[in-house]
Image (spheres, rainbow, N blue to C red):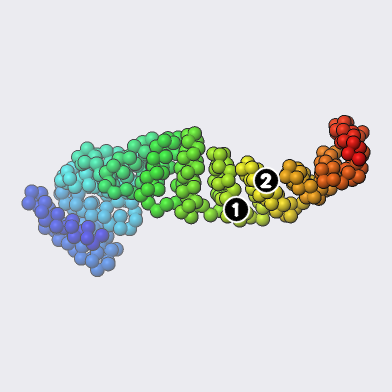
Amino acid sequence: MKRWLLLFLVATSLWGATQSMSPRTFETLNTINGLLEANQSSQAKQLLTSTIAQTAPQKSYDLAFLYNTQAGLAIQEGNYTHAIASYQTALDFGVLPSSMQTNMRYTMAQLALQLARYAQSLDYLAVWEAENNMTHEAAKLKMVAYLGLEQPKNALIWTDKAIALKSEHDLTLLQNRLALELQLGLDSRAIDTLKLLIEQFEPKRDYYKQLSYLYQKEGQTRKGTAILESAYQIGLLKEYDEILQLAQLLHYDGAPIKAAALLQRATPPIDKAKAHWEYMAQLFLSSRENAKAIKALQTRDALSPEPKTAMLLAQLMAADAQWAGCISYAKRLDTPQGKMLLGTCYAESGERKEAQKIFSSMVEDTRYGKNAKLWLESLRNQE
């Protein structure tokens, strides 16, 4: 505030060469400046108010500067409504230099934004813009005003202009542009903005995740996976669900071994441990690594034994000719399919009597009876 008023007094003395200001008004402004320097704002305000009341209406030049000063004091107090009114009164006299008038309207535009008077702010800026080249800061003001008016398309136009008017990249503006692009469904533009944010600023997990999502949405799944891989490699993906998502994308892209290796380094939360080991087994099976799939399922089974897991383990061990293991898990199954599997494992392991008992109990089964009879006949032929 002090700096502003000192500049103001210097400007007043310069303009005095062509404009007439009474010595009394000039001295009053100088006194006000001294009071402000001494932190006596209330006395300065009282003096200004009384001076305005005592100044003759025909002294429009004096009054214009007095109201301009009153606006400055109102800003200092945070009374933006009063500041705008004082500026408007100063402007209505029509005697101030044009450059000063446009600058006052620029300040009024800033104050109107603070009061959420967005349309009014744009009106003030339009007058300012008619006599000045657009600047980075003014473009930002228009962006904020259009955001306040909930006009995202116009807000994006002025965000782009604000970015173009600044030599270096502005993080906040790029983040605003991204939000508007996403709101408007401009995915291709949003991809470019996210790439710029990643290249120019400190990498953030959300940028990578959002970029990956947009690539996948555009049908560029491999690019989406590669982006998340990059995030993982630089340590941005640490949560289990994030690593699981990346593993699923790798699996979808035909890289189950890579996905399994990724998940082997992750520690699932307790409530997701069973699903984790089931998925690990699935990945190993997709990679034709049955031994690792069996180990994964055994870990899963140790957490909470269930018939489904026992069936998978019995089937995998049978396929691997691990008859003892197959028998161990098949014994836990109390279903026709499970009994047939147990009988098969007994037969293949050479335990014919146990196999015969199982198959004999199954000959009346509507689904497996015929197969059970064939097994019994085969076992008799081996005697």
Label 2 CA crowd tier, 10 Å (few <14, some 14–19, many 20+): some
Along the line of sight, the residue nearer the viewer: 254 or 47: 254
In the rendered image, which residue does mark 2 sit on?
A: 290
In the rendered image, which residue does mark 1 sit on?
A: 264
Earlier residue among tags 1 and 2: 1
Tell me how far mark 1 sits from mark 2, CA to CA. Answer: 16 Å
State if disc 2 and disc 1 touch (CB < 8 Å).
Answer: no
Along the line of sight, the residue nearer the viewer: 56 or 125: 125
Does residue 130 appear left or right of residue 116 in this picture? left
Under mark 2, the amino acid is Asn
Residue at horizontal 16 percent and vertical 51 percent from the top: 62
Q: Position of residue 55 (x, y in %)?
A: 18, 53
Q: Position of residue 232 (x, y in %)?
A: 50, 51
Does residue 237 appear left or right of residue 94 in this picture? right
Label 1 CA crowd tier, 10 Å (few <14, some 14–19, many 20+): few
Q: Position of residue 310 (x, y in %)?
A: 77, 47
**Which image quarter: residue 2?**
bottom left
Q: Secondary structure at mark 2?
A: helix
Does residue 78 appear left or right of residue 65 in this picture? right
Q: Secondary structure at mark 1?
A: helix
Residue at horizontal 21 percent and vertical 53 percent from the top: 66
Residue at horizontal 92 percent and vertical 33 percent from the top: 364
Q: Quadrant of the C terminus?
A: top right
- Which residue of the protein is positioned furthest toward the bottom in this rendering? 38
Q: Is residue 288 visible?
A: yes
Under mark 1, the amino acid is Gln
Does residue 292 appear left or right of residue 325 in this picture? left
Along the line of sight, the residue nearer the viewer: 255 or 131: 255
Q: Is residue 53 visible?
A: no
